[in-house]
Image (cartoon, grey):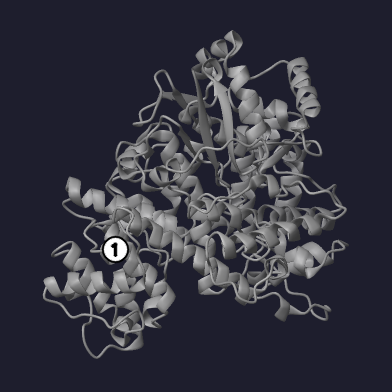
Amino acid sequence: MQGWIRCQLTSEGERVHCLSSSASSRHTEGRRLSQRPHRPSSQLTSLRFHKMTAPAQISQDELEELREAFAKIDVDSHGHIGTDELNDLFKAANLPLPGYRVREIIQDLTKTGDLHDGKVTFNEFANVSSEVNSTEVAKTFKKAINKKEGINAVAGTSEQSSSGTQHSYSEEEKVAFVNWVNKALEKDPDCKHVLPMDPTTNDLFTAVGDGIVLCKMINQSVPDTIDERTINKKKLTPFTIQENLNLALNSASAIGCHVVNIGAEDLKEGRQHLVLGLLWQVIKIGLFADIEISRNEGVCVKCLFECGFSITVHHLISLSPEELLLRWANYHLEEAGCSKINNFSSDIKDSKAYYNILNQVAPKGDEEGIPLIAIDISGIREKEDIKRAECMLEQADRLGCRQFVTATDVVRGNPKLNLAYIANLFNKYPALKKPENQDIDWSSIEGETREERTFRNWMNSLGVNPRVNHLYVDIDDALVIFQLYEKINVPVDWDRVNKPPYSKLGSNMKKLENCNYAVELGKNEAKFSLVGIAGQDLNEGNRKLTQALLWQLMRRYTLNILEELGDGQKVNDDTIVTWVNDTLTQAGKGTISGFKDGSIATSMPVLDLIDAIQPCSIRYDLIKVEDLTEEEKLNNAKYAISMARKIGARVYALPEDLVEVKPKMVMTVFGSQPHRTNHMKM
């Protein structure tokens, strides 16, 4: 028996969306993807088909495990690893192989042309793992999973789990996340019923079950994402718990988390690997929020220019948060006269780099109001790595930065937890100042607009690979655009697409060819209005023209979902307005003239629509209805956006979009509401 399995890869590495020709999906997104014709191609990089015979077939759950393992090694989310990391990758996937076997695999990949400049993509790894998985040796390893130190295994429990499937999760990560949540929410009275959690137990998986902790953590990472008035906190019932979980999942999606395969039931039942995967995404977004050039000019100059790097502003902006953290660490190491590091895994295992960074960033007592904190570096002379790591963490604790890692995590070089540790240290003690008299055009380093952030979060929530950190830089080769085309049922000929890693010579030409093809698809297949837009505009990051394409992609995505709910009948702006007004009229409420209607600035049409869809859901005593100030309008909008997410709408727009009556974003707010009703008249 043979079947096609389609893998949708995520940049965060927490989830893999996989559909076989015989599988059904409980998600709308999955249903839409499964309706497309299955067409194999050995050329796909980020979206790819694998043909597998029955003995070597990988289930969806196994693919998820492989992807999580891959993400532990591919810390910078580039989508590939070096061959020198392949051995560690097999270990992370609970498939340890002898050295000679790994070398044979590398040789085979080289012969078949699947090895690109010494890099292994996840797809190649998945194919190889399917073969390894089919051997008796692999079966033996599977039986030993529970014995692997630091790894817990649980039986597959989802609707699509295969018989005998196991999900593994890291005990180290669970402990780290529990401690982080305990610290972040220790003073929150709404969480006293579940906090503090015991990191040595499974408290975490129970604590997230009512949705409150998740909502609170989302607000910790991106403040004001969720209006506190919309969280159900007292006398919880199965229905109000469901609302909280809807609110958490839809809000997580709005800040860029990939939650396509995670449902409220998964969280309610505390499915360990899904809970940890979602929580890591939320935590990481918060940790990385300020590790961005436009928000930290000190990073820009100190870490890059003063270290002797020859780098353009464009290249500077393109650096991921992980890369910026590495340069920040190396800046302080260079200042201390120490050797630089290449990663936050193998290069920090002896704790010496950490010791020197702590000593560099600790307050020196030369700033008013900030007392001296002297770092004792005598522990660096400890002979045993584990003792040296513990001494180092004792010094980190003096700075209030002993989070995410234990001494064992440092010595083992856990890449995820060490990345979180260094990000937290940076956020608390960057030890950087904006230097004067630097010949840098700061105006060329612009911050992100609201609309740009909305587009970026929308793309990331769909699981595009690589993850989009900088809107215009990270789509300059159009690979993300091609993935978005597939999301809206526009077929992509992947044989025409150039894929990374690109050779140094002519790399931009390859990217430009992709961008030209992306514009061609938009005009000829998607039937978008792209007058005056060329591939060069996407490649060079023309803001206005790139946003024009992205908006049409987002709009089509919204309309496609509505058409699915309407049995394939065409939907447009007028259809949505008609449905909104019919629904409002039936509930005895006022109507709108369109997406530019001035009353939308008060958010009342949105709130009334939500109340019409789910009667008595809106607490009108919490909002101002007439004679609103600008602040009151914003408060209404925050409540409206969160309430929409609470009843199940996937809303990416921001409250300010309603207050300012941005018609494009307003359309997506109204367009998301019929997800709940299935009653749109076509």
Tell me the SS state at disc 1: helix
Identify the residue at image location x=72%, y=71%. 433
Identify the residue at image location x=55%, y=74%. 449
Q: Is residue 334 left or right of residue 624?
A: right
Q: Is residue 620 left or right of residue 459?
A: left
Identify the residue at image location x=20%, y=52%. 240
The amino acid type of the residue labelled 1 equals Gln
Can residue 187 be spotted in the picture? no
Expressed as whole percent of the image width and height from the top left, the position of residue 410 reads 65, 37
Q: Quadrant of residue 269?
A: top left
Residue closest to the eye, 604 or 287: 604
Q: Is residue 417 left or right of residue 103?
A: left
Identify the residue at image location x=73%, y=74%. 434
- Residue 102's place in the image compared with 534, above or below, is above
Residue closest to the eye, 531 or 429: 531
Can residue 99 be spotted in the picture? yes
Q: Mark 1 packing: few (<14 Cα in 10 Å), some, or many (20+)?
A: many
Residue located farthest toward the front when viewing the structure as drawn: 524
Q: Is residue 578 left or right of residue 137?
A: left
- Residue 5's place in the image compared with 538, above or below, is above
Expressed as whole percent of the image width and height from the top left, the position of residue 660 reads 40, 83
Expressed as whole percent of the image width and height from the top left, the position of residue 26 reads 34, 40
Residue bearing mark 1:
673
